[in-house]
Every structure is written in C-alpha cells, then in structure tokens.
C-alpha cells in the first residue's frame, strides 16, 4: 500500500515546487522586490510557462490520482507493473515540467505527454482487468 503512495506524494511535491517557482516569478510584480536578481528575472520571464505548467498538473494527473485511489481501495495496487507505471507517470510529469519551463519545446513535450497518457491508460486497464477478474 505504501509503495503507491510514494509516486502520488512525489507528484504533490512537484506541484509544491511549481507553486514555489511561480511565487518567485511573481514576487517582483506583487511585492516590488527581487527585481535585480538574475534568477528572479529569469523566472519572471518564464512566469506564463510556469503558470501553464502548474495548470497542467491538475488536468490529466486527476485520472492518475483516481486510478491510484480506486486500485488502493480495491486492493489491486500491489502489482509491480502498476507501481512501475505510476513512477513512469511521475517521472514523465517532472520531465514535462522541465521541458515546458526551461526549453518550451512543444514537440518534445508532446512526446512526453504521450508517454504519461499511455502510462495512466495502462494503469486503468490493469486496474479494470484485476477488478473484473475478481
């Protein structure tokens, strides 16, 4: 049970980190501070990308959380393939964030999104197979 909690927690940490980045990026405009820092200036120029990426964390990942919770509740989440897919999804979300914020490479982001999409669909299929087979 604990092993599926860890990828979900890792994604929550990613979201918290993105909120932190967005706060730093907005600091000069909101609090009139930090405008001279190179790091803050770099983040400020990527404010829209950080914000868009943070919004993305509440779209497709919702299906990830639902399948994790359903499978945990139903007792079918102890499958190594299922847990591996959860980690693939979370790693993909991290890479997706880096690519969107640092590189803004739409083509590469699309490839990473497809991997994330397939991982979550595979989790749903595994969950359904195990639940229907019970």
Image (cartoon, rainbow, N blue to C red):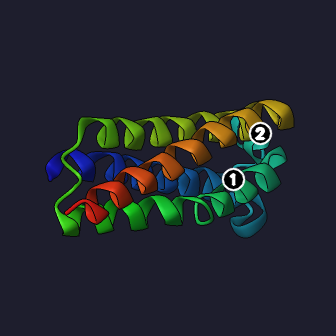
Depicted 2 relative to depicted 72: above or below? above
Residue shown at 78%/41% (left/top)?
A: 41
Q: CA distance from mark 2 to mark 1?
A: 13 Å
Residue shown at 47%/46% (left/top)?
A: 122
Give the SS element for disc 1: helix
Depicted 101 relative to depicted 72: above or below? above
CB-based contact (under 8 Å), mark 2 and mark 1: no
Q: Quadrant of residue 43?
A: top right
Q: Count residues near mark 2 (Cα–Cα under 10 Å), then give few for <14, some for 14-19, many for 20+.
A: few
Residue shown at 15%/50% (left/top)?
A: 2
Residue picked out by circle 1:
53
Residue shown at 68%/41% (left/top)?
A: 114
Q: Please name which of the two marks, 2 or 1, marks the residue nearer to the observer.
A: 2
Residue 18's x, y, as percent? Answer: 57, 52
Of residues 104 and 74, the one nearer the viewer is: 74
Q: Count residues near mark 1 (Cα–Cα under 10 Å), then give few for <14, some for 14-19, many for 20+.
A: many
Q: Earlier in the sequence, mark 2 or mark 1?
A: 1
Give the SS element for disc 2: helix
Residue 51's x, y, as percent? Answer: 72, 59
The extreme front residue here reads: 133
The quadrant of the rendering that contains the C terminus is: bottom left
Does residue 91 appear to the left or right of 51 in the view shown? left
Residue 98's x, y, as percent? Answer: 65, 34
Residue 126's x, y, as percent? Answer: 37, 50
Q: Is residue 66 visible?
A: yes
Residue 110, labelled with which disc? 2
Does residue 7 appear to the left or right of 106 in the view shown? left
């Amino acid at each position: 049970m604990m092993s599926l909690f860890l990828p979900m927690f890792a994604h929550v940490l990613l979201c918290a980190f993105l909120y932190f980045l967005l706060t730093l990026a907005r600091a000069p405009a909101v609090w009139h501070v930090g405008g001279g820092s190179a790091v803050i200036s770099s983040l400020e120029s990527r404010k829209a990308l950080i914000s868009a990426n943070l919004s993305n964390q509440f779209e497709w990942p919702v299906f990830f959380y639902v399948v994790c919770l359903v499978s945990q509740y139903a007792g079918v989440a102890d499958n190594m393939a299922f847990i591996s897919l959860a980690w693939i999804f979370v790693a993909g979300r991290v890479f997706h964030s880096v690519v969107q914020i640092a590189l803004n490479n739409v083509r590469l982001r699309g490839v990473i999104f497809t991997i994330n999409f397939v991982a979550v669909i595979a989790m749903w299929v595994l969950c359904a197979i195990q639940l229907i087979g019970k």
